[in-house]
Image (cartoon, rainbow, N blue to C red):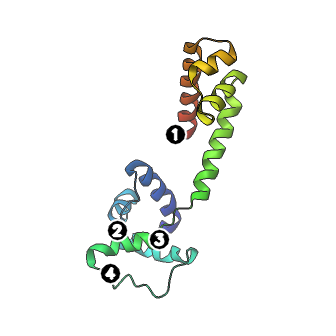
Amino acid sequence: EIALNLPEAREDLSKKLSRPPTIPELSAYLGKSEEDILEAMESGKNYNMHSLDQSVDAAKEEDKYEKINEYAQINEKGYEQFENADIFRSVMKQLTEDERKVFVARLLRNRSQRDVAKDLNVSQMTVSRMESNIKKKLKEEYFQ
């Protein structure tokens, strides 16, 4: 049961803390003992490959939590990129044609507001407002 909740707990805490959570932080978050967390991590270790030559027991006492966390958590960049691409696709569907053009020109091609406004035959203020709307939609989708 705990092992099934660990990935989501790690993800939530990682977002809140801007770093991987420690065993005590996971314990507090899930309302379980540190020993229970460690056992759950051990049972979930079958999903990850690590060197059989390394020993957590050989680590210094203060390094054990970090070593266990290293074994128990692998950050897959592919998943994050996939999630981000999904967010961008979802937001792009919500944008108007002009907002899509602003998004591509400003955020992907790094063009100035003035140049984009000239291309769209609108004011620079209009481009600025479109950018604000795009950012708002991205934030809403990301934190949903």
Give the alpha-carbon distance from disc 4 to disc 1, as whole Å.
38 Å
Query: How far apart are the two marked residues, 3 and 1, measured between alpha carbons?
Result: 26 Å
23 or 77: which is nearer to us?
Answer: 77
Q: Position of residue 104 (x, y in %)?
A: 66, 32
At label 3, counting other C-alpha atoms closer than 10 Å, the crowd grade (few under 14, some 14-19, many 20 or more) is: many
Residue designated by label 4: 59
Residue type pointed to by label 4 = Ala
| Label number found at residue 72 | 3
19 lies above or below 50: above
Which residue is found at the position 38% from the left and 81% from the top? 56
Q: Which mark is residue 40?
A: none
Q: Amino acid at mark 1?
A: Phe
How far apart in space, not on screen, are marks 2 and 1 (Cα)?
29 Å
Q: Position of residue 117 (x, y in %)?
A: 62, 17
Question: Which mark is drawn over residue 33?
Answer: 2
Q: Is residue 117 above or below residue 109?
A: above
**Foreground disc of the pair 2, 1:** 1
Q: Please tell me which residue is depicted at 62% across the width and 36% down the height of the picture.
A: 108
Query: Which label belongs to residue 143?
Result: 1
Mark 4 / mark 1, whichever is N-terminal: 4
